[in-house]
Amino acid sequence: MRDVVKVFKALSDETRLRILNLLLEKECCVCEVMQALDISQTRASRNLSALYDAGFLKLRKDGLWSLYSINSEGLQRYFPDLIEVIRKASAGSELVALDKERLKKTLRVGPGCVRRPTEG
Amino acid sequence: MRDVVKVFKALSDETRLRILNLLLEKECCVCEVMQALDISQTRASRNLSALYDAGFLKLRKDGLWSLYSINSEGLQRYFPDLIEVIRKASAGSELVALDKERLKKTLRVGPGCVRRPTEG
DNA sequence: CCCTTATATGCGCATTTACACATATATTCT
DNA sequence: AGAATATATGTGTAAATGCGCATATAAGGG
């Protein structure tokens, strides 16, 4: 029950829903998420951690990079339809579409090499 | 997208999940909810309103009573599996079981005729 | 070993949330 | 109309949340 609350809490934030939709496309590192969503490094990292803690994500380390992806096994056991619910519910969102578009132009470099959000 | 956030926000609270599980049993008035969950009138009313605003509930007035029930049509269009997700996820909760047990002994009388929560 | 780089985190602040208390509203009954 | 009752709501408060800033951590390269 507490876990259920935790799961829904993780989903009750626009940034995190955008991240989930992004990761439904492909595995991403923190720097790709921050570029695609045009948000700060802190914000990307913290929200990825939150989704990870709630059981939505898998984490894989590769050198300096933290690579996050949808955890289709763990959570699916308890919430088999949830990912589909999210996908369908976000299907019409322009913001999510824009995020996915920007994801294509993303480079696997961190905040040291990327301009900050919305600074040009 | 904003609506999606709103929906999940409504679900990310233990009290509201307990209420939903209660209403999956039967239509209830505010006073039945407050008795079954052993919570204050304000708390029952506010959380019922929140669930209503998010589209989860239907409201029917009968004299002094506000009768809330699951809105299986409205929300189901966008979140067809969500109710089942909630039901399954809460299946093992002792708290929810207790709520349902207390619901049986509930009287359709308001706070004027019912002792306050946990006062004996 | 030091520098660079990607990510995580301690801290502070502004906003939001949940709730209790008191009170307002609305409906029924006399 | 006035009393009784079920529900809704304004207000204040404590706690939780989201995020930026600065900094810590960890890995790789020279």
Image: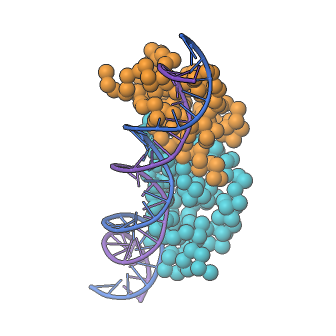
Chain colours: A orange, B cyan, C purple, D blue
Identify whether C21 is placed above or below A36.
below
Quadrant (top left/top right/bottom left/bottom right) for the C terminus of chain A: top left
Q: Is residue B23 visible?
A: no
Q: How many marks?
A: 0
Residue A51 drawn at (x, y percent): 57, 37
> Quarter of the image holding residue D20?
top left
Place of residue A41 in the rendered image (x, y in percent of width and height, measured from the top left): 46, 31
Residue B89 vs residue A107, the one in the foreground: A107
Residue located at (66% from left, 59% from top): B96
**Quarter-of-image position of residue A25:** top right
> Which residue is painted at 50% across and 43% down in the image?
A12
Q: Nearer the viewer, residue C11 or B36?
A: C11
Q: Position of residue A47 (x, y in %)?
A: 51, 37
Residue nearest the viewer, comparing B58 with D15: D15
| Residue displayed at 44% across by 51% down | B53
Name the residue rendered at 60%, 75% in the picture. Answer: B118
How far from the left and from the top, in percent, is residue A58?
Answer: 64, 31
Q: Is residue C3 left or right of residue B96?
A: left
For residue B58, side relative to residue A73 (left or right): left
In the depicted structure, whether residue B110 falls above or below residue A36: below
Q: Is residue B1 visible?
A: yes
